[in-house]
Image (tube, helix red, strand yellow):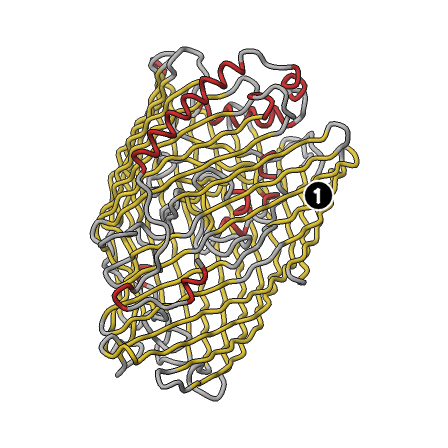
Amino acid sequence: MHSRLLTPLPPERGRFKGVRGLRLDGVVSSLTLALVGTLAQAQTTMATPSAQVQDMGQIEIKSNRDNDTTARRESTAAKIVIGREEIDRQGDASLGEVLKRLPGVTIQGTPGRGGAIRMRGLGSGYTQILLDGQRVPPGFSIDSLTPEQVEKIEIMRAPTAETGARAIAGTINIVLREGQKASPDDFKVGTSIEHGQVSEQVNWVHNLQTEGMNGTMTLSAFDSKRPDDVSTHTVSEVQANPGAKTDRTSETVSVGLRQGVHANARLQWRGEQGTSLVLMPFLMYSDYTNQGQTQLRQTDNAGAITSDSANLATQSRYVMTRLNGQFNRRLSADDLMEVKFGLGRSTYQYQFDQTGGVTSLLPTLTQRQDFTDLSNNLSGKLTQVLKNGHQLVSGLELEGVNRNETGTTSVTDESGDLKASTQRWALYSQDEWKFNEQWSAHAGLRYENIETSGTSSNGVRRNTSSVWSPLLHALWKPLPGSRDQIRMSLTRSYKTPTLYNLVALPSLSRETNSPTRTDRVGNPDLRPELATGIDLAAERYFEGGGLLSANLFQRNITDLIRYTISQVNNPSWAPGQTRWVSSPNNVGNAVTQGIELEAKFRLNQVWTEALPVDIRSNVSFFRSRVKDVPGPNNRLDQQPDMTANLGADYRVRSAPFTLGGNINYNPDYDTRRSDNQWAYQGAKKVVDVYGLWRYSASTAVRLTVSNLTPSDYITGSTYSGNGVSETARTTTRNWQNVTLRLEMKI
């Protein structure tokens, strides 16, 4: 695979070739039949549990697992619940590493480095992220959270009226740590090494013992060093003159230092008659510096060689302070009122300096961006338990974000100043009811309106969108009290353009402008993407814990938003020039479908002579097609053909030792993004292993090796049109990360 990428493709084939899209029709049928057979075999085996199964039932982890499984089983809408046991299992440094092992979840970026979190392989904006049930503030990434800050993770594959419909792929709700008065404090300190660079991290969770108040405080501090080694090989050709070819190779080597502190608390007061107040303050501080150097070498069609080098320096600082709150009051035995609010302020300061060499290949330039976001939200919800098993939930939501941004760059006269705001309000109602012991349903309707405006040197830009979202879920148990159940959902969801999509200021390329090194601008005329979705799932829950599930889904999407490349003459940010520019546009309709399979069980539940090893496995297959883009490989951005995980954990009975690991795999794939654009994503295989030695009930030592078998991560892009053809291939190195951590309860 790598060797073929080293050779540029001819203009008429200006794209990478890789894994072709799977036809899911036969795959779905085969896998469904296999699942039915497995369910039947598991039922026979579970009818006579062995003594080993009974012994495993005495282990402490069983009750936590059962609580998470019970919450998943009893939810009318499809939900996956991940509790403290599974969050802590591997000793991960970031929440993204926990999420990547879940069914249908993928992580963008270099293996072992974390990155943007996706559900069902869909790109940015398709997955709704909530923090304690509220939308996350601007600029916040849940991958920046440490696992110690989190109580549980809820994953909803289909939207509901209450959680919100901006969730074409699904919703991830992060619930922060809750106080446990009877529990001791958790204290963890660890050090890790990656390619010779050492990092440290300290985590402390303090449970409050105050009378009348239940609460917890979490503090995480880190000092992280990470190396980077990225090389890009670019071949450009003039189509009218195939001999006019330019070959260009650049390599950037740097070391980044990130230091920061995260602190959050959850404080709850309970009053009389079902009254309670919860306050959740949150602080995030992160300071980042990066020093490096870029070497560039260019060969033209005559064989003349030009080279250049530049020193790079990046500095950034992100500070977020936020207070979320929730007030509950029981109005009667059957009625509950809930009010949520949030206030937050985020500041981001960024500066990039490139000190160029003797040629113009790497110009000397400075880019700076500073912004301040002020965000607020207020929502009210009324829950009423009615006759005949109905539970009616109605609510109103208000949200506002105001951004003040300044930026400068040495290669343009643009001032870079921007003032923008987003105002959102939503109204919803939903009813959840139980027909009988076998059938229950969940129906809702939601209306949402979003207004965005921005003022810059280009004038005032405005965008308004509104969406009605009907939502229907049903749960069927073939037999009353059965551990088998079928879920069905018919929903409408959507994806709105981001503030950056709509009013972003021009962002110039750092190297010579070209079809693969474009400027970027926003588009205030974007429309939201709308999706009609169908979900169908079969689930079996084992008597001694564990489950099997198969989930089918399809989304029909209209007004798909995608970045497209064009040439712009005399743009406002570069007068008198012709620039290659990338901007978001509505490009047409698309369809995506897939199947997600999951199995969690102890090995001796299906093979009585086996060791009591916990098995965690899932595999998902995806297929998509953008109808207005010619094939093959006209898939949605960043969606692989499949993703798979296989994990196992074993607690040694003869010693206080637990060992385990996980293999995460995504194959490589090509994407045709437009008539003229192609993209390539290399394969990713990440192997993580750990060992936990428990000295006593309160002290343990954990050794974790992440990315055990590192391999180069390759991405590429191709443009062929307007008389030119250009292919760029980027190789990013990555390394093992070894972490040793002391875990104590004090």
Query: Could you tell me residue 66's position as x and y percent?
Result: 56, 24
Query: Could you tell me residue 216's position as x and y percent?
Result: 63, 39
- 483 left or right of 22 in image: right
Residues 177 and 535: in front is 535
Q: Is residue 161 visible?
A: no
Query: Could you tell me residue 204's position as x and y percent?
Result: 68, 45
Q: From the image, which quarter does the N terminus lie in?
A: bottom left
Residue lying furthest front in this view? 3
Q: From the image, which quarter does the C terminus lie in?
A: top right
- 222 left or right of 8 in image: right
Seen at 42% across and 80% down, the residue is: 298
Amino acid on which disc 1 is placed: Arg
Residues 509 and 47: in front is 47
Sort mark 1 into few (<14), some (14-19) or many (20+) by Cα contacts within 10 Å.
many
Marks counted in the figure total 1
Q: Is residue 312 visible?
A: yes
Seen at 42% across and 85% down, the residue is: 360
> Measured along the vertical axis of the image, is residue 666 above or below residue 74?
below
Residues 270 and 63: in front is 63
Residues 253 and 475: in front is 253
> Measured along the vertical axis of the image, is residue 226 above or below residue 245?
above
Question: Dot 1 lies on which element?
Answer: strand
Query: Could you tell me residue 209's position as x and y percent?
Result: 69, 34
- 184 left or right of 601 in image: right
> Measured along the vertical axis of the image, is residue 618 above or below residue 421?
above
Residue lying furthest bottom in this view? 358
Residue on which the image places disc 1: 702
Location of residue 701 by image quarter: top right
